[in-house]
Amino acid sequence: MTVVKTRIKSLVILAGCCIAGGILMPPAMAQTTDRAVAYKQVARACVEESKRFCPGLDPGVVQPRSEAMCLKTYKSSLSSACRRAVKATSP
């Protein structure tokens, strides 16, 4: 009888963790996904600016955060599309 009660308790705890994980995890994951999308937008919108202002970044290597951080220092010189994309990476 105690073995059955212990197994039932374990299943209830496991089910509770799965439900809580399903409710709590997506916002954090969504935030990460939004930031990744914003960094990709910087890469698309700021090709010329990256070449001009951040020549040390290798375009063949994925460095989206570094690119956005570099471009932020030149925000007054960026095109409007690039400026908006860089701004979208800020929390």
Image (tube, helix red, strand yellow):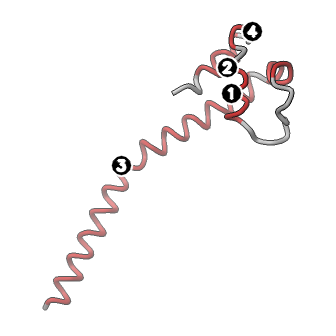
Look at the numbered disc 2 and give the secondary structure of its residue: helix
Q: CA distance from mark 3 to mark 4?
A: 40 Å
- Dot 3 or dot 1: first in sequence order is 3
Amino acid, disc 3: Leu
Q: CA distance from mark 4 to mark 2?
A: 10 Å
**Frontmost residue, 77 versus 31:** 77
Decide: marks 3, 1 in contact (CB < 8 A)? no
Look at the numbered disc 3 and give the secondary structure of its residue: helix
Amino acid, disc 1: Ala
Decide: marks 4, 1 in contact (CB < 8 A)? no
x, y percentage for residue 24? 36, 49
Q: Is residue 70 left or right of residue 47?
A: left
Q: Mark 1 = which residue?
A: 68
Identity of the residue drawn at 15% across and 89% down = 2
x, y percentage for residue 15? 29, 66
The image quarter in which residue 85 lies:
top right
**Frontmost residue, 75 versus 27:** 75
- Dot 3 or dot 2: first in sequence order is 3
- Dot 3 or dot 4: first in sequence order is 3
Look at the numbered disc 4 and give the secondary structure of its residue: helix
Q: Is residue 56 left or right of residue 46?
A: right
Q: Nearer the viewer, mark 3 or mark 4?
A: 4
- Dot 4 or dot 1: first in sequence order is 1
Q: Mark 2 = which residue?
A: 72
Amino acid, disc 2: Lys
x, y percentage for residue 28? 45, 43
Q: CA distance from mark 4 to mark 1?
A: 14 Å
Q: Mark 4 = which residue?
A: 77
Disc number at residue 24?
Answer: 3
